[in-house]
Amino acid sequence: MSLAPFHTDHEDVGPSEPRALAARRELLERVHEFVLKHDLAVNGYNLAAICNALSGSSSKMAEAFATREMSGQPIDQRWLDSVMRLDPETGHRMAELEKLMDQLEYALMRFAQTARSAKNDTSEQRGAIHAQIAGMGVSDEQDRFEIAQVITASRAILARIESVEKAMARSEAETTHLRAHLAKARIEADVDHLTKLPNRRAFERRLASAAQRAQLEREPLCVAFCDVDHFKAVNDDHGHDAGDRVLVAIASLLSEHASHDCFIARQGGEEFVMLLFGFEADAAWRKLDGIRRAQARKRLLNRDTGQPFGKITFSAGLAEVQGIHDTRAALGRADAALYRAKRAGRDRVETYREEMERGAADGPPVATS
């Protein structure tokens, strides 16, 4: 199957099928064929990336797909996740979303302050009018009539003020409620609901802040990808529910090693990602390899069937982050190191070396699960 962007000059288009409709049909067929050929999950992220590449609407995605196919390396879910992660357009959209959420939260905060201030002002005005009414004196019939009119008008104003106060109180309560929900949604948006680890969205922000801190404090920073070995076989042999429990168990082990200088998140699927602050490459390798060995020693059991899962291991790729503008490139280098670990037999940690770029396409392609 060719990955060249499709075009609308269709020779088979008949009078009953407009050219634009035929083009859409062709694109859908190519996306369908691509998903099945590479055994990719059908979800919005995947379909958007594949459609952008095959239609040519994203030249960077199209180039990445074509280069991958020509190299003979597998186009799998993990690689597709990496491409989307490294796509600057995706990062830009996430930044825009973060900015909009910040603006919304600020607007809600300002509205709550305004509502509170208005309620306080009306309360003070109501008290002042009550005091004026109480202090009015009556000297003759004309004064009594005029004062009665003033009192009637004042009471009407008081009623309106009390109504406004109640509306302001409701608005303040609703705004507080909305802000609480927004804060909860932002927290939940940063958590992977299966493993309870931070998710890719949270990791992207932590990586940016860690790179900035590392540069300011002149401290080393490393990033690593960890990918469960032969995970597809776990799902095939034991079912997806059991596979989910395996991921939860591995996430629990990784969490035991998380600390202020080691941030761990679920990247997606069977892949986890790690930031190691203050670690040179060799020290980071020793820490990560210690986690790998701890996992390899465990023996997991399928509680539904009583059957053992066997030895569940992961492979990892590690790279140093060279500065605040090197984060995406560092992710790419860690990705290349992970592929090297897979090709070298799995259940191992590889650190990125420059020679990996020269030998990236060497050897036959392997499945990366």
Image (cartoon, helix red, strand yellow):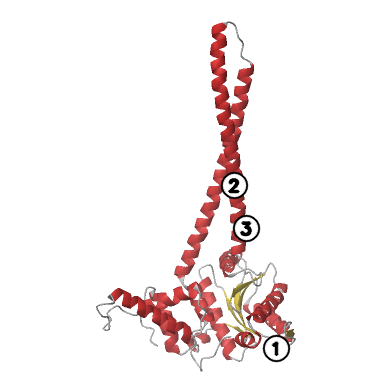
Closer to viewer: mark 1 or mark 3: 3
Give the quarter of the figure containing the C terminus. Answer: bottom right
Q: Can you say whether 312 is above or below 149 in the image? A: below
Identified by mark 2, the residue type is: Glu
Res 12 visible: yes
Closer to viewer: mark 3 or mark 2: 2
Query: What residue is shown at x 55% (from left), y 52% (from top)?
Result: 105
Identified by mark 3, the residue type is: Lys
Query: Which residue occupies the foreground of this view, 158 or 35?
Result: 158
Q: Can you say whether 75 is above or below 137 in the image? A: below
Q: Position of residue 364 (x, y in %)?
A: 51, 94
Residue highlighted by disc 1: 311
Classify 10 Å Cα crowding around label 3: few (below 14), some (14-19), many (20 and above).
Answer: few
Q: Position of residue 264 (x, y in %)?
A: 64, 72
Query: What residue is shown at x 54% (from left), y 7% (from top)?
Result: 142
Q: Position of residue 127 (x, y in %)?
A: 63, 26
Identified by mark 1, the residue type is: Lys
Q: Secondary structure at mark 2?
A: helix
Query: Which residue occupies the foreground of this view, 250 or 135?
Result: 135
Query: Which residue occupies the foreground of this view, 171 or 255?
Result: 171
Residue highlighted by disc 3: 184
Q: Secondary structure at mark 1?
A: loop
Q: CA distance from mark 1 to mark 3?
A: 38 Å
Check the image and name the residue furthest to the bottom.
363
Query: Which residue occupies the foreground of this view, 289 or 79?
Result: 79
Classify 10 Å Cα crowding around label 2: few (below 14), some (14-19), many (20 and above).
Answer: some
Looking at marks 3 and 2 on the same chain, the residue that comes earlier in the sequence is marked by 2
**Residue 308 in which image quadrant:** bottom right
Residue highlighted by disc 2: 174
Looking at marks 1 and 3 on the same chain, the residue that comes earlier in the sequence is marked by 3
Q: Position of residue 328 (x, y in %)?
A: 51, 72
Q: Secondary structure at mark 3?
A: helix
